[in-house]
Image (spheres, rainbow, N blue to C red):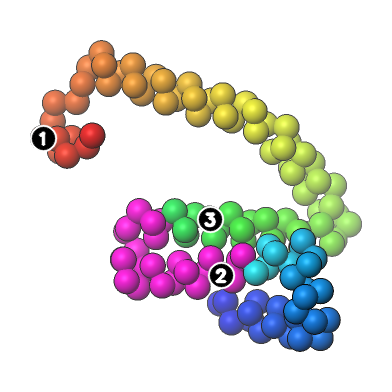
Amino acid sequence: MLFHPLYVDGQQAFKVGVVKFVSLGVNWLDILHVTIGYYSCYLQFYEGPQGTTSILILILSIILCLIKTFFYMKIFKSFSFIVTMILQVVVDLKIFILFFIILIMMFSMIFNVIAPPSKPEYSKVG
């Protein structure tokens, strides 16, 4: 799955020159996608697919694939408006999302103080 992007990006870097290829900001997304993808494969092989680091890197890889998909969808006129609108909504919502995460963390701490978990499976959780 990662051989094709690696091959295409390698061919493009060879044709335009590595320095020029790396200097373009759009290509950093492709480089990061391939690097994170292979690192995810490495972690899943040595750490296991259920490891915390493996899961976090896999989530990052999926987010990068989503960003690349949106980038390619903007090429088509029928998708361009929708993709631009979704990206603008995400940019506008980042302050609300940060506020919402803070509220969720505070409520979880309050619930931990009010009714601490007493089941034995929670004994190893700090």
Tell me if 31 is positioned left or right of 125 in this view: right
First in sequence: mark 2 vs mark 3: 2
Which residue does the numbered mark 2 point to in the structure image?
Answer: 35
Distance from label 2 to label 1 (Cα)?
A: 40 Å
First in sequence: mark 3 vs mark 1: 3
Which dot, 2 or 3, sits closer to the camera?
A: 2
Tell me if 73 is positioned left or right of 3 in this view: right
Element on which disc 2 rests = helix
Give the quadrant of residue 3: bottom right
| Mark 3: amino acid | Leu
Residue 49 spot, x, y in % from top left: 34, 63
Which residue does the numbered mark 3 point to in the structure image?
Answer: 60
Distance from label 3 to label 1 (Cα)?
A: 33 Å
Element on which disc 1 rests = helix
| Mark 1: amino acid | Pro
Distance from label 2 to label 3 (Cα)?
A: 11 Å
Which residue does the numbered mark 1 point to in the structure image?
Answer: 120
**Marks 3 and 1 in Cβ contact (< 8 Å):** no
Quadrant containing the C terminus is: top left
First in sequence: mark 2 vs mark 1: 2
Q: Which residue is drawn at 53% across and 55% down?
A: 60
**Magenta region: which residues?**
32-55
Mark 3: give few (<14), some (14-19) or many (20+) Cα within 10 Å: some
Question: Does residue 77 show up?
Answer: yes
